[in-house]
Amino acid sequence: MPDRYDVVIIGSGPGGYVAALRAAQLGMKVACVEKSKTLGGTCLNIGCIPSKALLDSSELYRLAKTRFSHHGIGVKDVELDLARMIARKSEVVKSLTDGIAFLFRKNKITWLQGTGKVLGKSRVQVTGDKTFEVEAGSIILAAGSEPAPLPFLQYDGTHVVSSTEALSFAQVPEHLIVIGGGYIGLEMGSVWSRLGSKVTVLEFLPNLLPMNDRELAGILHKSLVKQGLDIRTNTKVTGATKDGGRITVTAEEGGKKVDFKGDKVLLSVGRRPAVAALGLKEAGIAFDEKSGKVPVNEHYQTNVAGIYAIGDMIAGPMLAHKASEEGLAVAEHLSGRGGHVNYATIPSVIYTHPELASVGITEEQAKESGVPYRVGKFPFMPNGRAKAMDETEGLVKTIADAKTDRILGVHILGPRASDLIGELVMAMEFGATAEDVARTCHAHPSLSETVGESARAAWTTALHV
């Protein structure tokens, strides 16, 4: 007889492992199927965590070369030890994936190593060193996503690479061509630019980061250009040819054909759900064959009773924390509790320098909605803590309903934006007004004072202007 579990989860990324932990805490017998040799999925192994480790290391290297002297720190002959930097990245990853394995053991969650395939509403096949089946009261699909190729340009792992290979280059590319001006391309482009690569970003659309607030995305664009990235918008890539150790990317720019010659191409035009091995069609689970997305109801159940899907596999932004919230909601629903996710307050962060963090709607969306609104802005330049840190680039932008003063969205471009946005997520979760945030006491000197001043500007008038 196959082993039976209350819940079987396919995928151990931020959605899957969080669902597993919460379900186990709520008294369920849980198994998690993971094909990799480590837990944590794309985010912990080849996505969020290793990229941020390299972003921090490369930024320290850049600061040592360009800014330490401004602080009275003399550093001569700064050298790059790329092998050590990559090794440190791997150490960070290992510490966190080992932590997930520890939590699985602590919560008595069974890790089934292998590829999971749904055989029906209550059966999962696991293929690893051997093939076997398990039974499940409920199945949660949390297989995540994979890099999307272009029809005429496929990954080869050497010349044309995904973000996975770009995390572990053995040497700094002479010229890295990045196809796609989204957050992955800009983050990885920033890493290698800081370490010495010539980086060219080719973006099909007229603006970088079209889902972000247009004003702040434009300021970030200019900042990245100042840092050395060559960013080409309105540029349509049409093909690529390899010649020895080099690759030439052909594109159309302003109606003219242009060639870009480099030694590496980072293809970062988006991601797609990893559904190929799940057996969805055979199991009768509906999914969009073009996008790979799986339709679900308000409780994340697919069209097949007892089978659920979360994270990158369903509609919405492909964000680790969004998947985690959905994992929590599913686990709590299965235990009879009322788990839910407020999609209006999910933050997004781009970890360039400066960082760009957002929650809620953009000013463009506010205009399109027809809702009367006010905008309050406050720059980091006059902030005492920002000046002390020598990090004065950027601003905080608050969008509030003109009638009710309720906060509709906040966008932060600047130092530690990823940390500052948390206050605004909570504020919006509890329906706060701009006045509420403005009247909240923010420590002095701190970067958070810019948040209060921006809210005050949206409510009435900022003080330090």
Image (cartoon, helix red, strand yellow):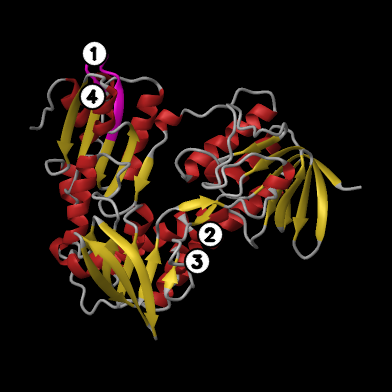
- Location of mark 1 (residue): 403
Task: Answer few, some or many: residues within 10 Å of disc 3's Cα (few below 14, many 20 plus, some between 14 and 19).
Answer: some
- Give the CA distance from mark 1 to mark 3: 51 Å
Work out whether mark 4 precedes mark 2 in sequence or the reverse, and give the earlier one.
2
Residue 90 disc label = 3
Report the residue at 19% width, 55% height from top: 223
- Give the CA distance from mark 3 to mark 4: 42 Å
- Give the CA distance from mark 1 to mark 2: 46 Å
Residue 320 seen anywhere in this rendered image of the structure:
yes
User: 228 and 30: which one is in front?
Assistant: 228
- Location of mark 4 (residue): 438
Q: Dot 2 lies on which element?
A: helix
Report the residue at 61% width, 22% height from top: 338
- Location of mark 2 (residue): 45
User: 197 and 123: which one is in front?
Assistant: 123
Q: Dot 4 lies on which element?
A: helix
Amino acid type at circle 1 is Lys
Front: mark 4 or 2: 2
37 displayed left or right of 48: right
- 407 magenta-colored: yes
Work out whether mark 3 precedes mark 2 in sequence or the reverse, and give the earlier one.
2
- Mark 1 and 4 residues: CB-CB less than 8 Å, in contact? no
Task: Answer few, some or many: residues within 10 Å of disc 4's Cα (few below 14, many 20 plus, some between 14 and 19).
Answer: many
Check the image and name the residue furthest to the bottom: 244
Check the image and name the residue furthest to the front: 255
Up-down relation of residue 364 to residue 188 (above or below) = above
Amino acid type at circle 4 is Ala
Q: Position of residue 241 (x, y in %)?
A: 37, 76
Q: Position of residue 450 (x, y in %)?
A: 21, 36
